[in-house]
């Protein structure tokens, strides 16, 4: 038995030192545990009972388990008890802004988008209306921009192109005017309006040959385009193409007896050494002849009467 007690002392000292780190002293043949400073005040009195007394009469096989259980209970009693804090109130999480927003707009909603496509006429009318509004505010660049946008959508909008050309010409942008008209001619070679407008601009610049060249490219109906053939005849006369001018004047006079056409015909006949008296008498009798032209005709007829011959110069 003494051998068992000695082995128990040795085992207990070794086990406690290794596993729990507690200080072990052998005092007067008894095994004592010195608890740590943290646990000294709370250690119960019975924890200082010598283990040798507890282990007396215990079989050696049960000694290890008994010692381990006892040490475990002692350490649990010596450990500081945690403070019992009241349970924290549970706070309901707030809904996120997105969730609230969805909740507020959780009802079924549907946005219907219907595309409105303006017709060609409505689009051009709207752009011309905006150009008119810009001109009313004396904003020429904006007006030109509106018309240019209309042509960008519909390049074959001939009336809009002519209006833009007139605006460009009105502010002296001759190069841009010619470009706009020439683009129209390239797109619609048989459209009379572009060639007529461009030829008038060239005539203002006294570029008679260039104007005649434009007019010679197209031969529309004479009765429907008298102004076109009138300019064509005048450009032919001013370019020295008198025979072409005579033919054109005769075509015109077959549809309308205009004093200026009679005068032009007589001038070309006089230039070619032909009898021009009939044409001048017809021009003198016309009510639409200008005052300066009227005086010139009368002067030429007087010279013709005095000389009794055709005046060529």
Image: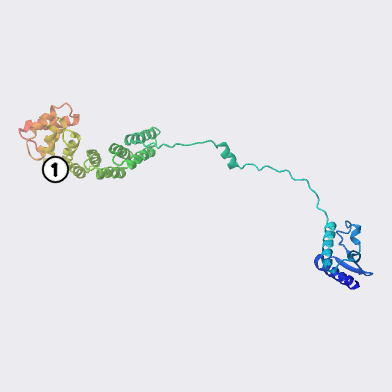
Residue pointed to by mark 1: 241
Q: Position of residue 167 (x, y in %)?
A: 32, 38
Q: Nearer the viewer, residue 283 or 235?
A: 235
Q: How many marks?
A: 1
The residue sitting at 6% across, 33% down in the picture is: 307
Which scheme is used to colour this image of the protein?
rainbow
Horizontal side of 18 relative to 150 (left or right) equals right
One can see residue 129 in this view = yes
Residue 100 image-quadrant placement: top right
Compared with residue 181, is residue 36 higher up or lower down, i.e. above or below? below
Is label 1 in a helix, a strand or a loop?
loop
The residue sitting at 80% across, 66% down in the picture is: 19
Seen as rendered, the residue at the extreme bottom is 3
Residue 282 image-quadrant placement: top left
Residue 4 image-quadrant placement: bottom right
Compared with residue 50, is residue 171 higher up or lower down, i.e. above or below? above
Compared with residue 125, is residue 217 higher up or lower down, i.e. above or below? below
Q: Position of residue 261 (x, y in %)?
A: 15, 33
One can see residue 295 in this view = no
Q: Quadrant of the C terminus?
A: top left
Horizontal side of 52 relative to 181 (left or right) equals right
Seen as rendered, the residue at the extreme left is 308
Q: Nearer the viewer, residue 35 or 107?
A: 35
């Amino acid at each position: 038995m003494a051998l068992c007690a000695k082995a128990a002392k040795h085992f207990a000292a070794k086990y406690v030192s290794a596993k729990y780190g507690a200080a072990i002293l052998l005092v007067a043949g008894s095994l004592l545990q010195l608890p740590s400073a943290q646990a000294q005040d709370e250690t119960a009195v019975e924890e200082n009972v010598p283990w040798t007394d507890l282990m007396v009469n215990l079989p050696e096989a049960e000694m290890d388990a008994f010692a381990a259980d006892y040490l475990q209970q002692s350490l649990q009693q010596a450990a500081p008890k945690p403070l019992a804090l009241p349970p924290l109130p549970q706070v309901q999480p707030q809904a996120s802004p997105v969730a609230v927003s969805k909740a507020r707009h959780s009802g079924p909603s549907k946005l219907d988008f219907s595309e409105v496509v303006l017709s060609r006429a409505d689009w051009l009318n709207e752009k011309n209306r905006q150009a008119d509004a810009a001109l009313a505010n004396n904003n020429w660049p904006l007006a030109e921009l509106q018309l240019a946008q209309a042509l960008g959508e519909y390049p074959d909008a001939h009336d809009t192109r002519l209006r833009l050309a007139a605006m460009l010409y009105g502010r002296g942008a001759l190069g841009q005017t010619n470009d706009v008209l020439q683009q129209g001619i390239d797109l619609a070679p048989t459209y009379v309006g572009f060639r007529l407008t461009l030829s008038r601009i060239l005539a203002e610049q006294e570029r008679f040959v260039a104007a005649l060249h434009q007019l010679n490219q197209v031969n529309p109906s004479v009765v429907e385009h008298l102004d076109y053939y009138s300019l064509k005849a005048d450009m032919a006369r001013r370019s020295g193409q008198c025979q072409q001018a005579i033919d054109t004047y005769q075509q015109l006079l077959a549809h309308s007896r205009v004093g200026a056409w009679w005068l032009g015909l007589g001038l070309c006949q006089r230039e070619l050494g032909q009898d021009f008296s009939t044409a001048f008498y017809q021009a003198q009798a016309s009510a639409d002849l200008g005052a300066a032209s009227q005086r010139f005709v009368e002067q030429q007829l007087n010279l013709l009467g005095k000389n009794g011959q055709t005046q060529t110069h």
